[in-house]
Amino acid sequence: MTQLEQFTTPVDAVVARMRALDAALPARDGVAVFNRVYLAVTEAVDRRIDAGRFPDPRAAITLDVRFAERYLAAVDAAAEERRPPACWRPLFQYRRHPGVRPLQFALAGINAHIGHDLALAVVDACRTLDCEPGDLEDEFDRVGDLLVTLEERIREDLMPGPDLLQIADPLTHLLGAWSLERARDATWSTARALWALRRLPDVAREFTDRLDAAVGLAGRMMLTPLPD
């Protein structure tokens, strides 16, 4: 068995879990909207790993799986009526609200997952691999590039109306200032800061809690119900 084969099962497992969620949830459910987006990203990453597009497949798989596990843990928490992280709570609270549009659900989920989960996943992966964040920067950037490309497609597919630049549409005002690329850059800085704080657990916990709350507040604003 090759080194790569030893690490393919976890990716297969998270993809299977997301496909099961896609089959089980109503299409209009806010979590289902985000899940479809994230499933497409995870499948794209998996294909690129299989094609040898990542210089270090073991690192790419570890980061991909640790990242997905945080989203799936939030899904499990909500299903078991436990409190998910603050960054995810708005999506679970508003997932069935008729005044929230699919684009809002998709971007609010991306906001939670990139703004909070990805930084922690980098730290998780560094601990698993016994490496520094800098050793994962190439994998982080390649996954981020896929996400940025997907964000553009999401906006095109889910933005209502024939004109994507309708300045009178309140959705344009609400979501126009948010950028996944800027969020990704901030996340890399956050991951490095958390790694530097790993020997100060109380400070790291406070930093993480404040990050969670801030990302959750942004998600709540993104899910503001809008008139038809």
Image (spheres, rainbow, N blue to C red):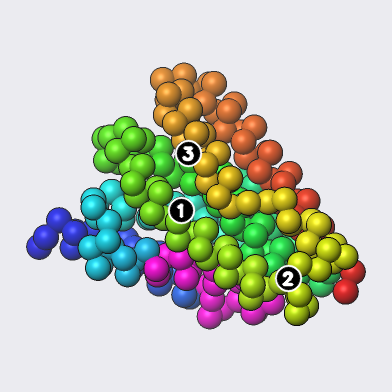
Q: Residue at x 74, y 57 (%)?
A: 175
Direction from residue 173 to residue 208 in the image, left or right: left
Q: Which mark is residue 164?
A: 2
Task: Locate the N terminus and report the quarter of the image it occupies.
Answer: bottom left
Q: Which residue is labeled 3 in the image?
A: 188
Spatial distance from mark 3 to mark 1, Cα to Cα?
10 Å
Q: Residue at x 40, y 70 (%)?
A: 43
* Nearest the eye: 181 or 223: 181
Q: Residue at x 32, y 69 (%)?
A: 47
* Nearest the eye: 86 or 122: 122
**What secondary structure do most residues of the magenta stretch adopt?**
helix
In the image, residue 204 above or below residue 118: above
* Type of amino acid at the residue the image marks with label 3: Trp
> Percent from the top left, x then y, of residue 68?
45, 56
In the image, residue 200 above or below residue 75: above
Within-10-Å neighbours for mark 3: few <14, some 14–19, many 20+ = many
Q: Are marks 2 and 3 in contact (CB under 8 Å)?
A: no
Q: Are marks 2 and 1 in contact (CB under 8 Å)?
A: no
Q: Which residues are magenta?
A: 21-44
Q: Which mark is residue 144?
A: 1
The mark closer to the camera, 2 or 1, is 2
* Type of amino acid at the residue the image marks with label 2: Leu
Q: For the residue labelled by badge 2, is the local secondary structure a helix, a strand or a loop?
A: loop
Q: Residue at x 38, y 54 (%)?
A: 142
Direction from residue 220 to residue 40 in the image, left or right: left
Q: For the residue labelled by badge 1, is the local secondary structure a helix, a strand or a loop?
A: helix
> Percent from the top left, x then y, of residue 204?
52, 26
First in residue order: circle 3 vs circle 1: 1
